[in-house]
Amino acid sequence: MAIAPAVSGSFIANVYPTQQPLTVSQFIAAAKPGNVAVCLSGGGSRALSAGMGQLNALQTLQRTPNATLPSQATLLSEVKALSTVSGGSWVGVLFVYLPASISDKNYLGGPYIPPDQLTPQGLGTSPADCIGSQIVSDFTIEDMLLQAVWLYWEEGVPPDMLWQTIIALHLLSPYGLFPFADSADTPNSFYTYNQSTLSAIVNANPSLQQETASLVSAEPRPYLVCNTALFVNSAGQSLLAPVQATSFMTGIVSEPPNATDANGFQVGGGGVSSFAFNSVPTAFTTPSVTVQQQRQWALVDSVGSSSAAFAAPLQQLASSFAADPERFAALLRDRGPAAHNFLTRRGLRMNRSPGRVASALAAHAARDSSQLRRLAGNLQDLIPAYQYWPALNPPANQTINTTEFADAGSLDNTGITAMLAYDDIQTIIAFTNTSTPLSKDQNGNIVVDDCLPPLFGYQPYVAGVGYAPYQGASNPSNPLFQNNQVFPSNMFQVLLNNLWSASGSGSYQNSPMYQQKLTTVANSWFNVAGGREVTVLWVYLERVQAWYNQLPSDVQKILGQFDSMKNNFPHYSTFDTELSPTEINLLANLTAWVIVNAQSTVEQLFR
């Protein structure tokens, strides 16, 4: 699997300054009925599983032919854009770049099955190519930390690339989307849209001919925005600015006011050809920029930085091991070989015998724990960091220090703000695949996930307080969300009331789904123009009695009683990263059923 080292040197790329208005059609000209965008929220393996079902449902449903649109097509093929966050990126990015040799149906778990036809045996299996099959083993936080140990110690992967490498080995590698070099498993690839955009890159940069280039699947695919975020300083506050990684360009398309990166540069203004992100500009003549680069920006970087929140618990676990090396040694002895074997199965050529090394470390810890303390300590700097520079004014021939990146969900876990930056997106299907159940407190406040209130200018729910506005707050909760308002504040209670009503007002008889017409509020942090009329179909993850009642009794037993379903189904914790095939398939079936059951409502959006 290991191939030639990544190409370093000088490269020519395009700069894409943000034009007003920014449109998807600037990049993909194909007309799509309804101009619909789908947003897959974050949420780790829960979001992956839910998104798998939601994409499968859109692939299952066919648009009814009419006089204007006489041909049949799946609703998924008619989606104009796809915005992904964190765990949503785990399923969405790979879907867009899925190799032609793998069927969409297998990737999304097989044909949609009505809930009354499910069986315990069928739920326990998935197609080998299913994305859910990649998270059923070797995928706990402890497993991944031990994999990080081997990658750092044996392969020399730098700490700030460990998380990205781990997630790529689990999710990208099985689909041929993570080619890497012998040297420190360095990614040796880049990605772009199609053969035409690839030819333009290679013609300008012949040295890139030897690298693997991932292209968007030949099947109809939406314009992809994989969201991540960049730490910035704004008026003395540490905040996050939105980074969009697309098949054409990567960068901050907005101009967040008074927001500077680690180099003191005002961020924003557009992007650079995605392959040339993470570089140092040396010359700039519109629309071209010459950059110096050690390696090209790859899918591993986009997907890894989009889900960077998982680097934090890895760091915390490493910190606990630094304080307790005996526990670290015991874990290495007991589970280190399994982590080693996983990496070997993914094509790494490990040098040392895992059993011998783990035993030696355990014995060494009994005599002198300093080596293990040092190893664990070196694993406490896992936050992704890249050389960012603003496309608005590329700082040619200046020192570019790395700036740390954050999980996209730490800024906007819905992915909605990214889609509103594009003027030709008229409708959004917002899949909020949350761990927060819809509920009502003793004061009558309807409680929803933290990601929704900031879109309307409110701070997340606080018990005993409810929802307080960000405007005028001297010490707001979740200050990273304070610049997220894109919809009028007076429409938030309308959303709450309708989600609660749609769910059965606490009976959870039906799915919390609500179609809402909204007018955008101008937002320079995300490049959102004010006064645009958009339709949002909110789809909130929740247990649904109508779906549960259709399950055969032996499947219901797997879940337990509806009011107290096992493991808090479907709201698995975001950091419960490893799920069983049955848990994945049941969650995907629920989310698919919600969309199939609402076919007329969903289909109407595409007319």
Image (spheres, grey):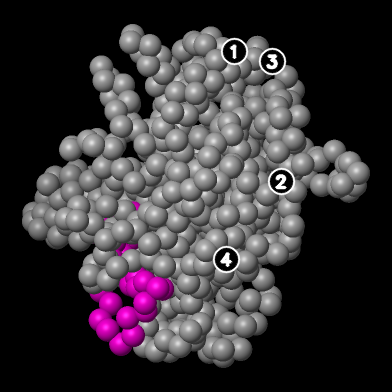
Q: Nearer the viewer, residue 340 or 481?
A: 481
Q: Amino acid at mark 2?
A: Gly
Q: Which residue is mark 1?
A: 509
Q: Up-down: is 350 above or below 309?
A: below
Q: Which residues are magenta?
A: 380-406
CA distance separating discs 3 and 1: 12 Å
Q: Residue at x 59, y 22 (%)?
A: 511
Do residues under tags 3 and 4 come within 8 Å of each other at their CB atoms?
A: no
Marks 1 and 2: which is nearer the front?
A: 2
> What kind of element bears circle 4?
loop
Marks 3 and 1: which is nearer the front?
A: 1
Do residues under tags 4 and 2 come within 8 Å of each other at their CB atoms?
A: no
Q: Looking at the figure, which quarter contains the N terminus? A: bottom right
Looking at marks 3 and 1 on the same chain, the residue that comes earlier in the sequence is marked by 1
Q: Which residue is mark 3?
A: 550
Looking at marks 2 and 3 on the same chain, the residue that comes earlier in the sequence is marked by 2
Residue 394 on the magenta segment: yes
Q: Amino acid at mark 3?
A: Gln
Kindly indicate the quadrant of the structure image that contains residue 62. Answer: top right
Q: Nearer the viewer, residue 22 or 595?
A: 22
Do residues under tags 3 and 1 come within 8 Å of each other at their CB atoms?
A: no
Looking at marks 1 and 4 on the same chain, the residue that comes earlier in the sequence is marked by 4
Q: Residue at x 32, y 81 (%)?
A: 395
The spot of residue 433 in percent (x, y) is 50, 34
Q: Which residue is mark 4?
A: 247
Q: Residue at x 42, y 60 (%)?
A: 254
Marks 4 and 2: which is nearer the front?
A: 2
Q: Amino acid at mark 1?
A: Gln
